[in-house]
Image (spheres, helix red, strand yellow):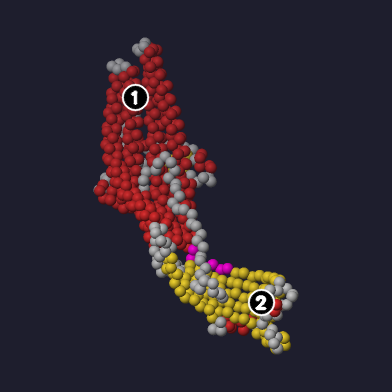
Amino acid sequence: MKIPILATVVLIMAVAAPARAQGVALTLDEAVKRAVEHNPELAIVKLETEVDAAHVAESKTAYTPVLSTILGRSNSTTPPTNFLLGTQGIDTGDWFSSAGVRQRVPVGNGTWSLSWDAARTTSNSPLNSFDPSVASGLRFAYSQPLLKDRKIDEARVQYVVAKRNAASSDLQFRESVVQTVAAVKQTYWTLKALRANVIVQQRSLELAEQLEKENAVRVRVGQSPPIDLVQVQTEVAQRRENLIRARSAAEDGEDRLRRLIMDPADASFWQAQLDLVDEPMGRADLPDLDAVVARAQNERYDIARARNDVGKAATNVEFRSNQRLPDVRIQASYAGTGLGGAQLVRTGAFPGVVTGTVNSGFGSALGQTFGTDYPTWSFGVTVSYPLGRSFDEEARVRAEVERRQAVQRVASLQLDVATSVRQAARQVRSTAEREDAARAGATLAQQRLDSEQRRYQVGLSTSFLVTQAQRDLLQAQVSLLQATLDYQASLVTFEALQLAPATSGASAIGVSGSAVQPIPTPNPQGIFRPGAVQP
């Protein structure tokens, strides 16, 4: 029995899979598409990009206006502390409300606040001029840093870092896509080779079984000693074991491919037979290696993420340098006050006798508030500066060291990229040469087996020599399969390394950013002389 010479890679790996009811014809592009759509590891990394996008939105909330309001009622009774108040306790009741808005300004990092309050107060104090009284007040204040915090402050740092983290997360996702696609291609071609190995092992077993039949006939007619039949039977048993191992390895390879491309919600996919449609790529001329290395050093996603880290470190240096400056702020405020209600008209000597009232409603108080009846304003500058080396000075030194470290990481990665891409290119060339050598070896092994079988049929050879020739052919065919697989794998690796590093045994999934911390919005109140009464 003769075996056709495996002259080309396509002939070796074009293996007809056994038909099943749930067969799935799968091209390489379809396998890649399935992996990108369904691979749970990729989904995790994709969700991480959404997490970092949410962090950007969280950091922007530092500039969201904050509304605060109060509505309440109070009542207090106090003992008389003045002989003018008599001997009775003083009852004071209030209905009051207050509302205010404050916001950090994105440009210049100043803060402003606007508040309005109103109250209705009743009291039995004989000293009051109004009972009840209604009051209204309006206040606007603004604080603007001139040096420290003007160009960059804590809120700005968080926003810039969150944006860079989001960009790094997107680059991490793209990197994971490249690595997943490479893993799918590697597994696809590996499964093709494993199935081809099953065919090779099956043909080798058939050769041994055919030789066993011929030896049995020769032993019966006395042309060969019984030991020749025992030797061939031993070879048959060994090759049957090899076939069992090959089938098991092919099934394992099929599960590995399923794991990469299946929808986790579709459990039936474990039973589907994957019929691999595509055949191995032919020989490809390598592009200019220096140009490939230069492009990879500029465009690889891990280097882009490292450069992003340099940008984050530079932002931290800028922030810490800014924090060393004196804290000089312009503070300004304006407040208007209004008073109304039932004004008591008194006659006679102090404290007088109430003879009537003059009513002015809440509208009168509001008019005074928005007018110029009772204005209060302030304007000034505050300055603070630490004496001696501050925390921010030491933090700036640390941040500068971290920035230089980030720069060196980029340089180190560029060297790694050049090394790995050049090594991958050499691997492509060497595996191509190995494939040519293995194909020539398989052709010669086939010719030797054919010659040995013809000599055996005319009595010029022995079953041992035929068995040895069969073993050599089997080894040559397996070597050709391995060389073909290694060539396809080297092409995939060379392509992937231009965009992303090779995956390690551990998970490539990583968290790119950190949680955003809420930053309270300051509430400027203006500047007043210490001890002075404020409105």
* Local crowd size for mark 2, using a 10 Å CA cut-off: few (<14), some (14–19), many (≥20): many
- Residue farthest right in this picture: 88
Q: Residue at x 38, y 44 (%)?
A: 182
Please tell me whether residue 210 belongs to the stretch shown in magenta: no
Residue 456 is situated, as x and y percent measured from the top left of the image, at: 31, 19
| Secondary element type, mark 1 | helix
Asked if residue 475 shows in the view, the reply is yes
Q: Nearer the viewer, residue 524 or 9?
A: 524
Residue 95 is situated, as x and y percent measured from the top left of the image, at: 67, 73
Asked if residue 148 shows in the view, the reply is no
In this rendering, the answer to whether 70 lies above or below 343 is above
Q: Quadrant of residue 330?
A: bottom left
Q: What residue sits right under mark 2 in the picture? A: 120
Q: In which quarter of the image is residue 388?
A: bottom left
Which callout, 2 or 1, points to the residue nearer the camera? 2
Alpha-carbon distance for marks 2 and 1? 106 Å
The tag on residue 471 is 1
Q: Which residue is drawn at 41% across and 37% down?
A: 191
Residue 473 is situated, as x and y percent measured from the top left of the image, at: 32, 27
Q: Which quadrant is home to the C terminus?
A: bottom right
- Amino acid type of the residue that numbered disc 1 sits on in the rendered structure: Arg
In this rendering, the answer to whether 31 lies above or below 388 is above
Q: Are marks 2 and 1 in contact (CB under 8 Å)?
A: no
Range of the magenta residues? 62-68
Q: Quadrant of residue 73?
A: bottom right
Which callout, 2 or 1, points at the residue further toward the start of the chain? 2
| Number of numbered callouts drawn | 2
Residue 433 is situated, as x and y percent measured from the top left of the image, at: 27, 36
